[in-house]
Image: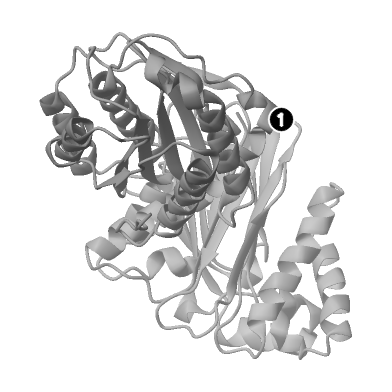
């Protein structure tokens, strides 16, 4: 079992608001909201809080928020700094659990070699940040103004099934449990995968998850190679990109 | 750290390199030193050994130490891999004690061709696993080839093949003539630089301790400079 992570600034961003990290049995990405002040800090605080809990095998979005809020207050950052998505994948005995708070992508290589993908998108590109759960007024305003979520699921290269529901009707945080025997590799990515000019997110994810090996800095190597090849073809991503993978083999 | 054996297509000798699973960095400069240990080198074998130790020590302290791998070859009429491609952090001076064992004649073309082909093959192996790789080779000799089955043309072809492939970002190959006091040898090696595809020929008139210490400094600095060029798409080399 091994995990690795990578994040990089998009062309239209002055500061990278994505963050990614990985431990021995977990991997995560966090994408700070572009329009919230200091959300680059927030993405990191959420990620560090989640990382600590994942190391202790006691992860939950609620505990992560509590810890991240303590750090945010200590650093005197505005509460909206924590407006960031959080996608985590971690090994829990026979399954890999995935938590999606906000938007982004989950890809999993099945034991037959095919790639399964879950894409979570939100109306107007406004995802339900977990930080809204800390503030009833913000949560209410969000659910009134936005709140429609589209979950697509399928195999790369095939048509996807999808469901579009209002967030009031479905759990705020999406959770998956993927049997380790059926899914030897699970990866999470921010919505930066959808920001490549001329390339759809599925193509980008297919390239990113085409990992020739899963040792050492395997995600860093894959992402750097992919981005270089994309640049050589004149393809750039305007949004920040984060990608993290957990190999269960 | 586990070494893995690799075969070279159509060649009697293969090479070894650290297996992918044991590599922590995302990019590497592969350095190969090919040392002539034929009979004529006997007078300064100890200084050559010290020179190699100096190179390894300097590279271990380089800012790029985590991104360097070294392979050391000795040749006379045969080729001997003292060690395969491995990170320098895994090396110590004692590993090189007695590494220069003087024997027979000089298969210079064979050794050079093999070294370049192995750089290409291991570079491709790493590149296939998404590592960024460039390479630098030093062939150190005191004389003319008199025992190779490969020709200068084979060497040139190997150089062109490796440089033309996309596996290595760049390859710098430097031929070093040590204790060159015979004009015919100097001419032979100078021609080999051009006809064999070396980027440079460094000629040293003596093989005393001071000269070989300077050579060690040149080799280690060249390795570091080539490593710093990794990612730029070009190669860099120094003057002696």
Q: Left of A182 or right of it: where is A53?
A: right
Residue at point 45%, 51% (across, down): B218
Instruction: State the residue in front, A229 or B189.
Output: B189
Percent x, y of residue B109: 23, 23
Q: Secondary structure at mark 1?
A: loop
Q: Chain of mark 1?
A: A
Q: Is residue B79 visible?
A: yes
Vertical placement of A70 versus B99: above or below? Answer: below
Percent x, y of residue B7: 35, 15
Instruction: State the residue in front, B51 or A152.
Output: B51
Q: Quadrant of the C terminus of chain A?
A: top right
* Count of picture labels: 1
Residue at point 20%, 36% (across, down): B183
Percent x, y of residue B86: 54, 32
Vertical placement of A175 versus A40: above or below? Answer: above
Q: Is residue A99 visible?
A: no
Percent x, y of residue A170: 64, 63
Instruction: State the residue in front, A114 or A237.
Output: A237
Q: Quadrant of the N terminus of chain A?
A: top right
Within 10 angstroms of label 1, few (less than 14), some, or many (20 or more) residues? few
């Amino acid at each position: 079992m091994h995990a690795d992570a990578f994040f990089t600034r998009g062309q239209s961003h002055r500061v990278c608001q994505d963050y990614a990290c990985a431990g021995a049995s977990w991997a995560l990405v966090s994408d700070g909201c572009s329009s919230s002040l200091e959300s680059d800090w927030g993405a990191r605080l959420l990620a560090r809080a989640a990382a600590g809990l994942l190391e202790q095998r006691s992860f939950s979005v609620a505990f992560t928020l509590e810890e991240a809020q303590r750090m945010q207050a200590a650093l005197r950052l505005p509460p909206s700094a924590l407006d960031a998505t959080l996608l985590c994948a971690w090994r829990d005995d026979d399954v890999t659990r995935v938590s999606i708070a906000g938007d982004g992508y989950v890809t999993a290589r099945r034991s037959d070699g095919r790639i399964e993908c879950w894409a979570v998108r939100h109306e107007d590109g406004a995802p339900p940040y977990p930080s809204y759960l800390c503030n009833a007024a913000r949560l209410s305003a969000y659910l009134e103004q936005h709140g429609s979520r589209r979950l697509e699921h399928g195999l790369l290269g095939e048509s996807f099934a999808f469901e579009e529901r209002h967030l009031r009707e479905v759990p705020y945080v999406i959770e998956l449990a993927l049997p380790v025997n059926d899914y030897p590799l699970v990866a999470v990515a921010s919505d930066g995968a959808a920001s490549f000019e001329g390339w759809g997110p599925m193509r980008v994810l297919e390239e990113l998850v085409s990992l020739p090996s899963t040792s050492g800095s395997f995600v860093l190597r894959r992402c750097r190679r992919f981005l270089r090849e994309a640049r050589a073809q004149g393809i750039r991503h305007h949004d920040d990109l984060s990608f993290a993978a957990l190999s269960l083999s | 750290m586990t070494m893995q054996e690799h075969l070279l297509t159509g060649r009697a000798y293969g090479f070894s390199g650290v297996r992918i699973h044991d590599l922590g960095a995302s990019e590497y400069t592969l350095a190969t030193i090919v040392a002539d240990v034929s009979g004529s080198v006997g007078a300064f074998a100890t200084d050559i050994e010290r020179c190699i130790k100096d190179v390894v020590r300097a590279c271990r302290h380089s800012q790029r130490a985590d991104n360097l791998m070294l392979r050391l070859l000795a040749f006379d009429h045969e080729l001997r891999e003292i060690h395969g491609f491995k990170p320098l952090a895994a090396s110590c001076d004692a590993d090189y004690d007695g590494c220069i064992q003087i024997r027979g004649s000089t298969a210079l073309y064979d050794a050079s061709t093999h070294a370049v082909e192995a750089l290409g093959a291991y570079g491709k192996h790493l590149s296939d696993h998404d590592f960024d790789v460039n390479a630098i080779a030093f062939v150190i000799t005191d004389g003319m080839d008199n025992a190779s089955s490969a020709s200068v043309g084979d060497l040139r072809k190997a150089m062109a093949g490796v440089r033309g492939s996309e596996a290595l970002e760049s390859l710098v190959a430097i031929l070093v003539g040590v204790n060159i006091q015979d004009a015919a040898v100097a001419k032979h090696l100078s021609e080999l630089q051009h006809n064999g595809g070396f980027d440079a020929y460094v000629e040293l008139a003596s093989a005393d301790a001071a000269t070989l210490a300077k050579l060690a400094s040149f080799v280690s600095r060249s390795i570091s400079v080539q490593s710093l060029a990794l990612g730029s798409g070009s190669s860099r080399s120094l003057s002696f």
